[in-house]
Amino acid sequence: MLFSTRIFRPANIVIGAAALTLAACGGASSDEPAETNASTETIDDSATGALGEMTRGSTDATVTVIEYASVTCPHCATFHEEVYPTIKENYIDTGKVRFVFREFPTPPANLSIAGSMLARCAADEGGMDAYFLLLDTLFKTQKMWIYGESPREELVKIAAQAGMSADDLDACITRQELLDFLNENVTAGRDNYDVRSTPSFIVNGTLRHFSTVEDMSAALDEAVEKAGE
């Protein structure tokens, strides 16, 4: 899944995508954890802004959850609206879990990449709070900006929440270094964790898939207990 921003049409946002197959949205079971090629990953916090890790929770948490998700994936939107708030309250805000969000675009590729880049550009000025604000909005208004008559105009409205103008949006989604960064995240997700669908969760190095609060809570309780042994 290697992307290029060489083609850009402000009227409808067109970004070329080629080389690797896009991930599927949903389609995975939460029954069994999957072995991966990586142990528990150490999160690198040295970079900030658009090219930094987007995290929530204490750096001292014994459990790290990395979510690979797409802003155009309905299953990801459902998770963030129906499951994540409870997980945040019970595990992230209490210091048990550190949560890392990484983009893993799904069709429609052009919009998935543009939305991801927009959220990251917001972090240049507003930090992670601005990033997660736009991420939440992208999920909540997913149908409007993906299937509306003018996706670009909808994204301009979303960008305004972070104080970004239409020109800022246009400049953002032509940033080659940001596109390269997203490509690296995708490649690492596939190579290190065998991520093939979204949302996928890496719980202390183990690939998992969750669809309910109960499933995820049980897995996190187990991981916290194991980490404390």
Image (spheres, grey):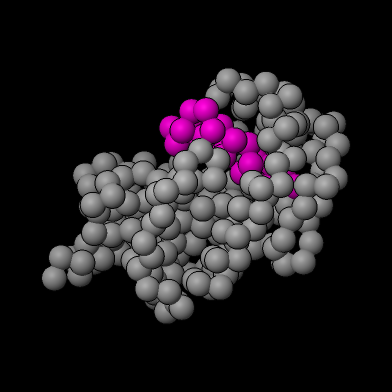
Left or right placement of residue 28 versus residue 45 in this view: right
Q: 151 or 54: nearer the eye?
A: 54
Tell me if residue 166 can be seen.
yes
Residue range in magenta is 110-135
**Left or right, residue 179 beside residue 62:** right
Q: Which of 131 and 215 is in front in this view?
A: 131
Whole-percent x and y of residue 70? 59, 51
Q: Position of residue 46 (x, y in %)?
A: 42, 48
Compare residues 168 and 151 and report the one nearer the observer: 168
Residue at image x 52%, y 28%? 125
At 66% from the left and 54% from the top, the residue drawn is 180
Q: Residue at left 37%, top 73%?
A: 39
**Position of 120 compared to 202: left or right?**
right
Residue sitting farthest toward the left:
229
Does the image show residue 132? Answer: no
103 or 210, which lies in front? 103
Within the image, what quadrant is residue 128 found in? Answer: top left
215 inside magenta stretch: no
In which quadrant is the N terminus drawn?
bottom right
Q: Residue 224 falls in which quadrant of the image?
A: bottom left
Give the vertical position of 217 relative to 153 (above or below).
Answer: below
- Main secondary-structure element of the magenta-colored stretch: helix
As drawn, is 109 to the left or to the right of 178?
right
| Residue 54 place in picture, x, y as percent | 45, 45
Tell how many labels: 0
Name the residue located 47 percent from the left edge and 46 percent from the top edge: 47
